């Protein structure tokens, strides 16, 4: 076990609106020695811009950007994750308090999770600070409950809908559907469900879609679809 005074927090900054950040997230950002974001340029990160809206003094902090390639090549990803963890460990070995900013919540489809596995395996202390996920934020924007009574909620990446019939009872939340939104819409149309979506929730270019036909085929990465039983 490596002994180090450093600690790293994986902090969720919410879906886009700085006012949705938690008090704990703001406190830890203010106290941190180093602020880390995924990407090539720290200040261009969406997560950084959200945090800066709530904590302007973040601009005075030491910043570290960790490149995360957008690829499905597992070997390339594994190498990037190992290199990213090494960069974080270098900071932790100096006894620094490190904050890694992530969109939404750090437990839901989060890049930090891959780094967390390496850090914990190497003996470093990691704590997660929950944030408001896009799932809850989008449901609130639409003004609808995700579940009532004993309804189940199914959260799946939109890319997997080709293998799922969408015929189980309850509500389906489809995330990360951008690469095949047209096909996802076809699947949803067949399901006969009531469909709504929010694009870029909490951001300046936010758009609410009240039915399936309003959702553009090129909706983009920050598109979340909620499909409920009629």
Image (tube, helix red, strand yellow):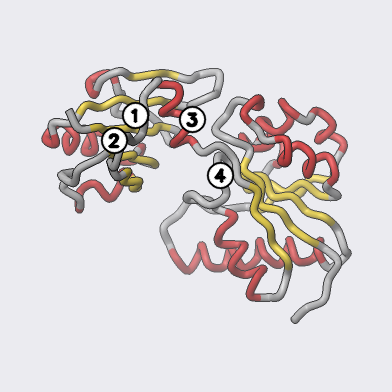
Q: Secondary structure at mark 4?
A: loop
Q: x, y percentage for residue 11?
A: 66, 46
Residue 105, labelled with which disc?
4
Q: CA distance from mark 1 to mark 3?
A: 21 Å
Q: In the image, which is nearer the foreground, mark 2 or mark 4?
A: 4
Q: x, y percentage for residue 165?
A: 16, 47
- Residue contact at pointers 3 and 2, CB within 8 angstroms: no
Residue assigned mark 3: 137
Residue assigned mark 2: 181
- Residue neighbourhood size for the residue with mark 3, other residues' Cα within 10 Å, grouped as few (<14), some (14–19), many (≥20): many
- Residue neighbourhood size for the residue with mark 4, other residues' Cα within 10 Å, grouped as few (<14), some (14–19), many (≥20): many
- Residue neighbourhood size for the residue with mark 2, other residues' Cα within 10 Å, grouped as few (<14), some (14–19), many (≥20): many
Judge from the rendering whether residue 164 lies leftward or rightward of residue 63; answer left or right.
left
- Residue contact at pointers 2 and 4, CB within 8 angstroms: no
Which label's residue is closer to the chain start, 3 or 2?
A: 3
Q: Is residue 128 above or below residue 169?
A: below
Residue assigned mark 1: 218
| Quarter of the figure with residue 91 | bottom right
Q: Residue at x 15, y 44 (%)?
A: 167
- Residue neighbourhood size for the residue with mark 1, other residues' Cα within 10 Å, grouped as few (<14), some (14–19), many (≥20): few
């Amino acid at each position: 076990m490596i002994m180090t005074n450093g600690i790293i927090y994986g902090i969720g900054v919410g879906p886009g609106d700085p006012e949705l950040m938690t008090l704990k997230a703001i406190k830890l950002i203010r106290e941190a020695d180093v602020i880390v974001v995924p990407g090539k340029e720290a200040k261009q990160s969406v997560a950084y811009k959200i945090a800066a809206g709530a904590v302007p003094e973040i601009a005075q902090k030491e910043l570290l950007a960790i490149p995360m390639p957008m690829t499905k090549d597992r070997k390339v990803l594994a190498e990037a994750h190992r290199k990213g963890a090494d960069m974080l460990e270098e900071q932790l070995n100096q006894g620094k308090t490190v904050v890694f900013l992530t969109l939404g919540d750090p437990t839901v489809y989060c890049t930090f999770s891959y780094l967390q596995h390496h850090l914990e395996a190497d003996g470093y202390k990691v704590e997660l600070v929950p944030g408001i996920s896009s799932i809850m934020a989008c449901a609130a924007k639409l003004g609808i409950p995700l579940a009532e009574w004993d309804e189940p909620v199914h959260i799946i990446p939109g890319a997997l809908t080709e293998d799922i019939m969408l015929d189980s009872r309850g509500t389906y939340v489809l995330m990360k559907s951008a690469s095949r939104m047209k096909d996802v819409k076809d699947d949803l149309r067949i399901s006969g469900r009531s469909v709504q979506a929010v694009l870029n929730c909490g951001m300046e270019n936010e758009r609410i879609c009240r039915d399936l036909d309003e959702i553009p085929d090129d909706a983009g990465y920050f598109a979340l679809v909620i499909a409920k039983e009629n």
